[in-house]
Amino acid sequence: MTDHLTIGILALQGDFAEHRQALERAGAAVREVRLPADLEGLHGLVIPGGESTTISRLMLAYDLMDPVRALARSGRPVWGTCAGAIMLAARVPDLDRPTLGLLDVGIRRNAFGRQVESFEVDLPVPALGEPPFHAVFIRAPLIQDVGPDVDVLARLDGGAVVAVRQEHLLATAFHPELTDDLRFHRYFVGMAEARARAEAGPGPK
Ligand code: GLN
């Protein structure tokens, strides 16, 4: 029943093409979003990895900040990966540009230092079941504080939080779109499907 769902992918900068492919393989129709009008009728939105400074600047330039906030506040699921997670966060002390401020978390950019710019790890994610998810981190942020309504979905060995969900908002510090494992994309499409079903109300018996 996912074929009627259209998921938007913010396509201003970053690795939106990989997300597009993964979402399509997970069964959703995908629309690239560059202008506020592109948000019309979407069942969910993905904000990709890239450079949060650039994404913030372009979202302001194209007047996308308030329309994306409105989409999220209407209950439509929004998922940010890496720079996209930074854009969702309420608190990013080392970013001197606005974020959407939707997700009640504090995030530290480039948290793993210059020596360890990128790494891959098999990450247990109980919400996805077995096996662990092969997570690709690229100049990744980490989630350093979470508000009371935020569920932690995954932690690195040392305890650092790298995936969270707050109701219809999802954030991952790593890049599920860079592996063949579609479980995170299916999980997000499932969130959008549940929301669309709730909006449609009870169907005919
Ligand atoms: N380091 C980037 C930032 O701070 C995020 C990197 C990524 O999205 N892979 O925006």
Image: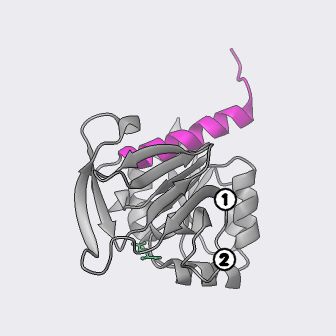
- Residue 150, image quadrant: top right
**Residue 71 percent coordinates (x, y):** 72, 57
Above or below 178: residue 154: above
Report crowding for label 1: few under 14, some 14 to 19, many 20 or more residues within 10 A (C-alpha).
some
User: Mark 2 = which residue?
Assistant: 98
Q: Which label sits on residue 124?
A: none
User: Mark 1 = which residue?
Assistant: 102
Give the dominant element type of the magenta stretch: helix, strand or loop.
helix
Residue 109 appears in view: yes
- Residue 118, image quadrant: bottom left
Residue 84 appears in view: no
Residue drawn at point x = 69 percent, y = 64 percent: 68
Residue bounds of the magenta highlight: 183-205
Q: Which amino acid does label 1 sit on?
A: Leu
**Residue 154 percent coordinates (x, y):** 39, 47
- Quadrant of the rendered image holding ligand 1: bottom left
Residue drawn at point x = 47 percent, y = 79 percent: 51
Instruction: For mark 1, give the secondary structure.
Output: loop
**Residue 138 percent coordinates (x, y):** 33, 71
User: As drawn, which residue projects farthest toward the top?
Assistant: 205
**Residue 186 falls inside the magenta stretch:** yes
- Image quarter where the C terminus lies is top right
Above or below 69: residue 65: below
Q: Which amino acid does label 2 sit on?
A: Pro
Determine contact: label 2, label 1, CB under 8 Å.
Answer: no
Position of residue 32 in the picture relative to residue 73 (left or right): left
In front of the other: 182 or 81: 81
Above or below 13: residue 78: above
